Image (cartoon, rainbow, N blue to C red):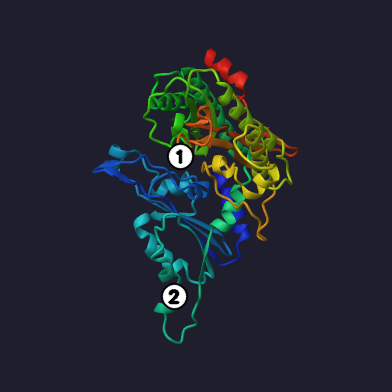
Amino acid sequence: MSNIYHQRRSELLEQLPNNSLVLIAGYQQKVRSKNIKYHFRQDNDFLYLTGFDEPDAIALLIKGDVNQYILFCRPKDPAQEVSFGARAGIEGAVEMHGANKAYSVAEFEHTLLPLLQGINTIYVSDELGRFSSQLISWANHQRHHCSFDTPKHFTSIKPLAELLHTKRVIKSNDELARIRSAVAASTFGHKAVMQACKPGVNERELSSLFDFTIAKHGCNDVAYPSIVAGGNNACCLHYEENCCELSDGQMLLIDAGGEFKHYAADITRSYPVNGRFTPEQKAIYQLVLNALDQAIEKVRPGAAWNTLYETCMQVMAEGLKELGLLEGTIEEIMASESYKRFTVHKTGHWLGMDVHDVGPYHDNEGHWRTLEADMVFTIEPGIYFPKDAIDIPEAYRGMGIRIEDDILVTETGFENLSVHVPRTIEEIEDCMGA
């Protein structure tokens, strides 16, 4: 695996001018209560370039006559390691993680300042602002501390994200394998929840069942807090309480994905708590599924990103008009965007190390980005009727339906990675009946 990180660092440095320095700040561990800490999760840019998964680390990449990779980390500490686990230490940073040099993190600033001599540009990845108050001081250190008649060196500071996040949108074979594993585990999780769903079950039971099932299939964690939302709870897009008992006649919306070796799945399914769709539930579900499927059919290299959203909105607006839930001609509905009252959100995002993965949706001229092979993203149309929407028929109120699949762009079209999670009305009713 260290070869993958070495290759990524080398490819990044090739894009930079000589006399550049890249500073990548890893995350620090957070305290939950007193001496109890939250489970540590490394910064994804840091992990992408180093593979180093310990708290309180910093990496430097230097582009010069000889490129360098310098890693700052916690030194070995037998007493701490007995309580909190083994550390790579300074030696391990070199021997196991490929650093040219390694130092204790306590030596970072002392070591950094001499390295900045002759550096023209510092590229920074520091998502939590760990060093935001010091960067300008470091960049100006030479000219503030040299004699008045010494040539002054001016160093600029740029965000690394502009280069790195664009690159992260295109997935390698190793990354695709990890995403596939996350999706496969999540498929088992969704099927288990679907079969356990029934009136009287609490949302938290189903959330825990999903966690248990993906753990059996190799995931250490969920990729994001699971949304298990019965009835009107589904009209809150990021509902996380998962605390209500499910009732007969409700729809359940579950948006849940496992994380496999730092790569995410993100899948949503909606279905009746009692396993059988009412006519109104069936009508809205099929409408959302039609929108999803027609958008998926648009996926191919060269297609513009926004066509997926526009397709979903067109299909759902036409369907809502046919059901009598929107008024006016379809031209008037699209022009006024009156459909947004019920569709609420955009219909997809990049997927990878982050569930809402990094990367631009526009090119440098501001045009929508076109799809390329080995991009992975979600498509997730939804329709929501909150219970207080008293101007629509009661049978629709208190219902949110979203369907979300994980899509890979291939050389000739697409692959629906999450297609094996039951998604048609017949598949869902058969699965729940089983």
**Residue 319 in sight:** yes
- In the image as oriented, which residue stretches furthest toward the right? 412
Location of residue 69 in the rendering, given as x and y in whole percent from the top left corner: 51, 55
Q: Which residue in the protein does label 2 denote? A: 142
Q: Is residue 260 above or below residue 133?
A: above
> Is label 2 in a helix, a strand or a loop?
helix
Look at mark 1 in the image and give the residue it sits on.
238
Q: Is residue 23 above or below residue 338?
A: below
Q: Nearer the viewer, mark 1 or mark 2?
A: 1
Q: Quadrant of residue 162?
A: bottom right
Q: Residue at x 29, y 37 (%)?
A: 82
Query: Quadrant of residue 240 in the image?
Result: top left
Whether residue 227 appears in this view of the structure is no
Picture residue at 51% right of the left edge, 50% below the top: 45
Q: Residues within 10 Å of mark 2 (few under 14, many from 20)?
A: many
Between 307 and 147, which is closer to the camera in this rendering?
307
Of the two numbered discs 1 and 2 on the same chain, state the one appearing first in sequence: 2
Relative to residue 428, is residue 53 depicted above or below? below
Q: Is 153 on the left or on the right of 305, as rendered?
A: left
Q: Nearer the viewer, residue 81 or 160?
A: 160
The residue type indicated by label 2 comes to: Gln
Secondary structure state at the residue bearing disc 1: loop
Decide which of 17, 380 is in the foreground and name it. 380
**Mark 1 belongs to which amino acid?**
His
Q: Report the quarter where the N terminus lies.
A: top right
Q: Which mark is residue 228?
A: none
**What residue lies at 65% left-to-right and 59% top-to-bottom?**
366
Residue 356, image x, y percentages: 53, 44
The residue closer to the viewer here, 126 or 94, is 126
